[in-house]
């Protein structure tokens, strides 16, 4: 169990890391920079974070939880499955674009570094699962999610879509994004339904 003193020290290192990432960028920030900013030794930083990737992952995890919470508050889980998938991503995207941390993580200079952490980190996968699990559970309860869906793989793909949309210009037309998600995201995830002639057609609400 973390003592209050250790928790405070870890929090100071975390805040110092965010400040360094903002000032120098992800790629250029070193663990020495973080240690100096937190007024601790380099060894102390490593006591809490095994490497810089782990530190970046923790920053993403912490901010993603706030981004997710804002999005969840605006999301109606009772929407029909196709609309629920689309609105879940639109709300997540809108919330992410309000975050100054996301701007730091996804700036062009450091995008590759952030992408590698997002793809490989269990902590990032954990926080993305937290957001999507209740949404996918609701869709599955309705019978709209194929029974053989690999949830971990699906959430990884949804994260890829989300990050790709985050790096689009912030002024991108919401209607255009909504149209693309409706046309490609929902039909690609939802279970097909049988037509009266017995032919499989797109998922609920599909064309």
Image (spheres, rainbow, N blue to C red):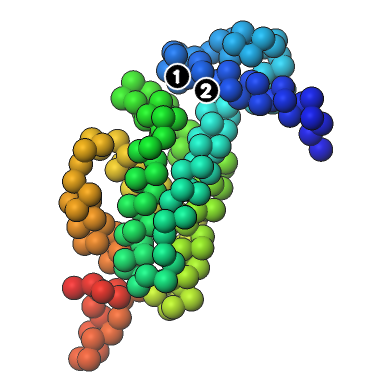
Residue 183 makes an appearance in the image: yes
Q: Is residue 72 positioned above or below 106 on the image?
A: below
Classify mark 2: helix, strand or loop.
Answer: helix
Q: Is residue 19 left or right of residue 206?
A: right
Residue sitting at x 21%, y 62%: 183
Q: Which picture quadrant has residue 155?
A: bottom left
The single residue placed furthest to the front in the displayed view is 74
**CA gap, disc 1 and disc 2:** 6 Å
Q: Quadrant of the N terminus?
A: top right
Q: Quadrant of the C terminus?
A: bottom left
Question: What x and y, as percent, mark residue 100?
Answer: 41, 29
Q: Which picture quadrant has residue 172?
A: top left
Which residue has dot 1 on it? 22
Q: Is residue 98 positioned above or below 82 on the image?
A: above
Q: Is residue 183 positioned above or below 120 on the image?
A: below
Residue sitting at x 46%, y 43%: 67
Q: Nearer the viewer, residue 147 or 10?
A: 10
Question: What x and y, as percent, mark residue 136?
Answer: 46, 65
Classify mark 1: residues with Cα within 10 Å, few (<14), some (14-19) or many (20+): some
Question: What x and y, as percent, mark residue 152?
Answer: 49, 55
Residue sitting at x 41%, y 35%: 99
Which residue has dot 2 on it? 18
Labels 1 & 2 near each other (Cβ < 8 A): yes
């Amino acid at each position: 169990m973390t003592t209050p003193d250790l928790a405070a020290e870890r929090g100071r290192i975390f805040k110092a890391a965010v400040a360094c990432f903002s000032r120098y960028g992800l790629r250029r920030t070193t663990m020495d920079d973080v240690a100096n900013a937190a007024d601790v030794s380099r060894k102390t930083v490593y006591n809490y974070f095994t490497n810089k990737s782990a530190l970046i992952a923790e920053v993403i995890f912490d901010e993603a939880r706030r981004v997710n919470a804002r999005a969840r508050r605006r999301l109606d889980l009772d929407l029909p499955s196709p609309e629920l998938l689309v609105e879940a991503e639109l709300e997540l995207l809108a919330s992410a674009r309000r975050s100054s941390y996301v701007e730091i993580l996804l700036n062009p200079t450091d995008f590759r570094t952030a992408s590698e952490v997002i793809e490989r980190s269990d902590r990032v996968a954990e926080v993305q699962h937290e957001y999507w699990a209740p949404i996918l559970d609701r869709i599955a309860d309705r019978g709209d999610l194929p029974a053989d869906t690999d949830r971990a793989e699906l959430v990884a793909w949804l994260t890829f879509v989300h990050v790709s949309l985050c790096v689009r210009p912030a002024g991108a037309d919401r209607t255009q994004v909504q149209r693309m998600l409706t046309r490609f995201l929902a039909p690609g995830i939802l279970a097909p339904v049988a037509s009266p002639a017995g032919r499989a057609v797109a998922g609920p609400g599909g064309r």
